[in-house]
Image (cartoon, coloured by chain):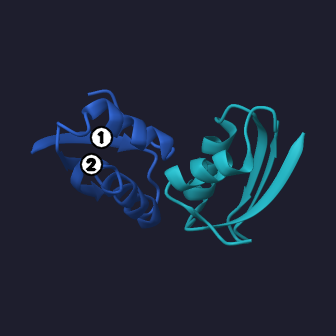
Chain colours: A blue, B cyan
Amino acid sequence: MSHIQLTVEGMTCTGCSNRLKRVLEGEDGVQSADVVLETKQVSVDFDSAVIDRAAIETAIADAGFSVAAG
Amino acid sequence: MSHIQLTVEGMTCTGCSNRLKRVLEGEDGVQSADVVLETKQVSVDFDSAVIDRAAIETAIADAGFSVAAG
């Protein structure tokens, strides 16, 4: 299982953060996603044979959020 | 130019509704989208030669919202 931690901009309420969690956990290959509104931190555990970091960042962007440059 | 009006569930703040507007207006073929948080109404003007209702509904779903049955 692979793990990434990202800083995501654009979440303004718990509705936003809960929704982003649902979107990520709906992606094939994502085992779990934790999203913390206050710190903007998104932690994702995923199977790198199924999904990669770029696809995770695309899902975040498709949900209307942006990933801060690492 | 074609027009649809949809009822979208899951928006909880103006951050949500502004983000959905940005997501929709970022789709090829969408000329404009108006999103009203309070009434859940989403109005989209689009070029039906480029994008169709199904693709618009998919973009809404990818953003983590759901379209109420018409």
Above or below, A50 against B41 in this view is: above
Q: The residue tagged with tag 2: helix, strand or loop? A: strand
Please name the amino acid that badge 1 sits on. Answer: Thr
Could you give the CA–CA distance between mark 2 and mark 1, rounded to whole angstroms? Answer: 6 Å
Crowding at dot 1, Cα within 10 Å, few <14 / some 14-19 / many 20+, comes out as some
Q: Quadrant of residue B38?
A: bottom right
Q: Is residue B39 left or right of residue A15?
A: right
Q: Is residue B63 left or right of residue B7?
A: left
Which percent across, then down, holds residue A69? Answer: 32, 27
Q: The residue tagged with tag 1: helix, strand or loop? A: strand
Callout 2 touching callout 1 (CB < 8 Å): yes
Please name the amino acid that badge 2 sits on. Answer: Val
Q: Which residue is mark 2?
A: A42
Q: Residue furthest right?
A: B1
**Residue at the image point whose x is 69% and y is 68% from the top:** B40
Q: Chain of mark 1?
A: A
Q: Which residue is mark 1?
A: A7
Do the residues indicated by labels 2 and 1 lie within the same chain of the protein?
Answer: yes
Q: Nearer the viewer, residue B43 or A48?
A: A48
**Residue at the image point whose x is 55% and y is 68% from the top:** B10
Q: Earlier in the sequence, mark 2 or mark 1?
A: 1
**Residue at the image point whose x is 18% and y is 40% from the top:** A4
Which percent across, then down, holds residue B49? Answer: 81, 33
Q: Quadrant of the N terminus of chain B?
A: top right
Which percent across, then down, holds residue B21? Answer: 66, 48
Crowding at dot 2, Cα within 10 Å, few <14 / some 14-19 / many 20+, comes out as many
Q: Quadrant of the C terminus of chain B?
A: bottom right
Q: Is residue B21 visible?
A: no
**Residue at the image point whose x is 54% and y is 55% from the top:** B61
Q: Nearer the viewer, residue A57 or B56?
A: B56
Q: Is residue B30 left or right of residue A70?
A: right
